[in-house]
Image: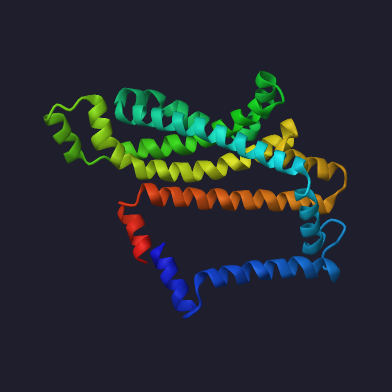
């Protein structure tokens, strides 16, 4: 990451990175405004950016919009929290106990590649068409991101440190707390960052296909009613949520891992 930042500075000396980011967004919005107006794309299906913005303002003036946004955030947060707790607990357990790691390896490799959307009919049959089905999909998708990372972190424990803990007769819980967890924590933070984005994708997908609640549900209603500008407005809201989730996850990672060399290197850069 440091090398990438240095290359950007070398390519554009004197220009701050945030200015380049703003310029990129402005260019995209300009093209989104001009291309439909000059007929390069069909304005019926891809309205100008100004129309999408006005539709977003109209939607934001309605209390139902904010309730839908809150519904999406709550669903995302609940699913991510469950996946995080389960992924960390089982990741530490499977990574620490060799028998369990080998016993579950084939099962994990069999279940992990299954797309969460493929389980949509199962979720509806078991849990109905409410929030619970969407949370089920979120947990299933996000859980693997955390589990695999935590297991990798546990396996990366320094053998010398592990042998030293055993020679001092550390109990299992003390060994996990003082030796295993500090090594696995950076991996867990990576799993959290990946899981947060995946959880948001599945939240919107579940709302769009199952419950018709939240931002995803309002997006689908806009599509069915032919309100194209409003549909794109909700796509834009989902994109903003994704950006916010990524920024918050990175900020949380930096605050938790302030002592880690990778974070200190970023700050120094």
In this view of the protein, which residue sits in the foreground, 148 or 239?
A: 239
Count the numbered circles shown: 0
To which quarter of the image does residue 32 belong?
Answer: bottom right
Q: Position of residue 153 (x, y in %)?
A: 34, 40
The percent position of residue 240, horizontal first and vertical second, equals: 63, 53
> Which image quarter holds the N terminus?
bottom left
Residue that sits furthest to the bottom in the current view: 14
Give the side of residue 191 with respect to residue 70, left or right.
left
Q: Residue at x 51, y 41 (%)?
A: 195
Q: Quadrant of the C terminus?
A: bottom left
Q: Is residue 89 left or right of residue 43?
A: left
Is 227 drawn above or below residue 107 in the view shown? Answer: below
Res 113 visible: no
Residue 79 shown left or right of residue 168 in the figure: right
Quadrant hosting residue 24? bottom right
Where residue 132 appears, as percent x and y from the top left, is 64, 26
């Amino acid at each position: 990451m440091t090398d990438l930042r240095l290359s950007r500075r070398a390519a554009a000396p004197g220009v701050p990175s945030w200015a380049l980011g703003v310029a990129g967004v402005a260019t995209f919005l300009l093209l989104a405004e001009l291309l439909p107006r000059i007929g390069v794309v069909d304005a019926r299906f891809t309205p100008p950016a100004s129309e999408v913005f006005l539709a977003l303002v109209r939607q934001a003036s309605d209390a139902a919009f904010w309730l839908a946004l809150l519904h999406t955030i709550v669903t995302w947060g609940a699913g991510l929290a469950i996946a995080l707790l389960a992924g960390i607990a089982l990741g530490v357990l499977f990574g620490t106990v060799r028998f369990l790691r080998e016993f579950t390896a084939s099962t994990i490799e069999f279940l992990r590649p299954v797309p969460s959307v493929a389980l949509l009919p199962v979720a509806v049959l078991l849990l109905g068409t409410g929030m619970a089905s969407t949370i089920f999909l979120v947990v299933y998708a996000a859980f693997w991101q955390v589990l695999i990372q935590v297991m990798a972190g546990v396996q990366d424990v320094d053998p010398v440190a592990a042998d030293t803990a055993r020679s001092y007769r550390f109990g299992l819980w003390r060994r996990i707390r003082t030796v295993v967890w500090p090594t696995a924590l950076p991996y867990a933070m990576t799993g959290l960052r990946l899981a947060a984005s995946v959880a948001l994708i599945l939240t919107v997908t579940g709302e769009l296909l199952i419950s018709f609640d939240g931002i995803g549900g309002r997006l689908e209603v806009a599509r069915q009613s032919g309100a194209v500008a409003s549909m794109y407005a909700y796509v834009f809201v989902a994109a903003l949520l994704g950006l916010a989730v990524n920024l918050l996850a990175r900020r949380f990672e930096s605050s938790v891992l302030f002592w880690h060399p990778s974070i200190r290197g970023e700050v120094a850069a």
